[in-house]
Every structure is written in C-alpha cells, then in structure tokens.
Image (tube, rainbow, N blue to C red):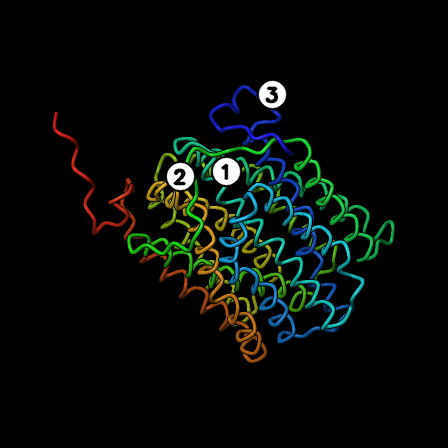
Amino acid sequence: MTRTVPLSEARHLPLWRRPVSLLFVMAAAMPMAFATWMALINNFVIEVAQFDGADIGWLHTVREIPGFLAIGVIAIILFMREQVLAIVSLILLGVATAITAWFPTLGGILTITMLSSIGFHYFETVNQSLQLQWIDKLRAPQVLGWLVAAGSAATLVAYVLIVMTWETLGLTYNTVYLIAGSVTVLGALFCFFAYPQFEAPNPQVKRMVLRRRYWLYYALQFMSGARRQIFIVFAGFMMVEKFGFEVHEVTALYLINLVANMVFAPLMGRAVHVFGERATLLFEYAGLAIVFLLYGGLYFFGWGVILAAVLYIVDHLLFALALALKTYFQKIADPGDIAPTAAVAFTINHIAAVFLPAALGYLWLVSPASVFVLAAGMAGVSFVLAMLIPRHPEPGHETIFHAPAPAPAE
C-alpha cells in the first residue's frame, strides 16, 4: 500500500478498490474475530475457567480499558496514517483472538483480552473517523446502515458453521478461535496490499479536541457506553447462567441477530435519513428502557427463556440505531475535527465501561434484576438528552438552545 490517491480522484479507480469498498472489506473482517470471541466467551470462561459473575465483570472491565485509552490514537496518527493504523489494529485483534484458548486461566484470559481489545478499540476509533471523512453527508445514514449489514453478513457465515458443526464435528474452543482470528488477519493483509492510501481533502487536527459546542454529543456518548456495557456483559451471561444455554444455542441466538441486522440495518439507515437523528434516537432510547425493565422482570417474575431470547434480539436491533449518533456528529463537526473527536468520544464512551462491569458484577451476585433496572434508568437519561437534539443539526445549531445561522441576504 504505497500509492496515495486523493479522495476526489478515487472515483476513477475500479469499484472494488474505492474507499467505500475498503470500508466494506474492513467491516466484514473485524467481526469475524470479535463476534466469534463474543459468541463463545461466556461458555468458555464458565466451562474452562470456572468464572462467576464477579470474574466476568473484571474480564469486561479489562476489555474496556483500551477503549478508555482510545485518545492515544491522536498520538499515533502523528506518525502513522489512520488507514494504516486501522489495518494494524485489525491484525492485532485477529492474532489475539486466534490464541485466546491457549491461556485458560484468569490471568491468561485477562492478558489476551487486553491485547485483542487494543486492536478492536483502536480499529473502531479510526474506522469511525474514516467513515465520516470518506462518506458524503447526504449518503452517510444509508451507507452506514449497509456497512452494519455487511458486518452482519460476514459473521453470519462463521455463526452458521459454529451452529452446524460444533457438536457434529466435536469442535474445540481453540479450533474456532484460531480459525476466526486467522480470517481477520488475512482480511487485514488484503486491505493493506490491495488498496492505495486515500487522502481526504480536510487534514485532521492531530491534538486532543474538546469543544464546548460538542457537549451534547459527549454526554450521549458517555450514556451510550455505560448502558451498552450492561447489555454486552450481562445479557449474554444471563442466557448461559440462568437459562443454561450451550455454545451452539448462544451462537444460534447471535445468528438470529445477524439475519435481523442484515435485513433491518439498511432500513434503519433509511429511517435516520427520513426522520432525522433526534426522532431515531428517541425511539431507540425509549425502546431500550422498556427492554431493560422487562429483563429485570425475568428475575422478579420468573418469566421464561422465550421472552429472554426475544428481548435479546430486540435489544440488539435497537442498539443498531446508534448510527444516528455518528451522523449527528458528522453534521455538527468541523471537517478537521473528525479524527481527534472520534478518539475523544471513544474515551468518553468508555469512562463508565472501565469501572461499571466490575462494580455491577458484585451487584449481580446479590440482585441481577437491579442491574437491568439501572440500565433502564440510563436509557431514560439518554432519552432526555436526545430531546435536546435539533431536527436539523448543523455547525452553530448543535442543540435546541442554539438557533441556526440566518440565511445570507440576497
């Protein structure tokens, strides 16, 4: 990857070598490792390492530390292009995932998780920045929706294989992790050698950017990180601990989520384009509050596994609407702020993630329902914040408290 191509000239390249095509390849490569890790991790740590709720909380706290340190991306892009950093991060994620089962102890799992998490979070930080720089604002909601669908489609293949072959072929955790991580590494190497380096027209500020006018975006990112941790850490853990789901059953649930994402993610992108970020995020947060309250009801009232599975799928779909938060920022941001603000936003998103899983792991031992009730409250706070987003956000009109700039006199 030695040739540099300005973004304005990339349209002359073959379709498969254009910037958006690169985004699609990376969108497919990343979840092959990460989603496979997520699908197996609860069964792996319970069956092999005998984790309890406190241990799983510490695992996810360690996993989120690199997200909190994502601001370090700003220092790295001083000497490394964002596109190269994205690919290097993918390789680290793939290698760490491949060797996950080689260290089946608490210390070993935490160490490998830290390495894979550095790859994941640094990739996601830079990938978000590249998406917002490379995709036109008018097309962003639809293209982002298709990128979500592409990632789901790629992971679908892996999950189908796990569901169909886990028991039939007697697969081991080591075999599945090794294959999944290797596929991600191969995908990253293809991205490195098959694509030129794309030069965006707006040079990115290579220092930390904290602007007062982005405060609502920062607040929504903070609440999103706190709320999402509860889903990631405890919703899947509940399916294994309370309802006794086995590997192929957990993977089947993930498989349903993937198919639903493939169908609905492009429609969600279209919804953001039609209804706007404000209405879309309000719908997401109201739905999440209801889902989390019903999660709590599974413990208070002893509701069954079918409802738990349905809620898990709905929960996952609602989180896909978070692409509206990306397009909200794209509309209000200065073009040169995208890369540094993406790094700052990831750090803000992970402030709660560093301590929340471990703390709530101990609460889980006492009252699992209380964990989900707390998450419902967080969704409610997010709903109130989303009400402050204007119908048509733009620079200078970031919240309903700031009037849009007057039209120039003719």
Where does label 2 land, which residue? 272
What amino acid is found at the position of numbered circle 2 in the picture? Val
**Residue at screen point 43% across, 33% down:** 201
**Residue at screen point 32% across, 54% down:** 211
Q: Do the residues labelled 2 and 1 touch (CB within 8 Å)?
A: yes
Q: Nearer the viewer, mark 1 or mark 3?
A: 3
Q: Which of 379 and 226 is in front in this view?
A: 226
Question: Could you say where residue 151 lies in the image, as x and y percent from the top left?
Answer: 61, 41
Q: How many marks?
A: 3
Query: From this viewpoint, which residue is outermost toward the front?
Result: 79
Vertical placement of residue 80 versus 68, above or below: above
Q: What element carries label 1?
A: helix
Query: How far apart are the alpha carbons under marks 1 and 3?
Result: 23 Å
Question: Could you say where residue 249 lies in the image, as x and y percent from the top left?
Answer: 71, 55
**Residue at screen point 57% across, 61% down:** 66
Vertical placement of residue 141 versus 246, above or below: above
> Mark 1 or 3 closer to N-term?
3
Query: How far apart are the alpha carbons under marks 3 and 2?
Result: 30 Å
> Mark 3 or 2 closer to N-term?
3
Where does label 3 land, which residue? 14
Q: How crowded is mark 3: few (under 14 residues within 10 Å), some or many (20 or more)?
A: few
Where does label 1 land, which residue? 145
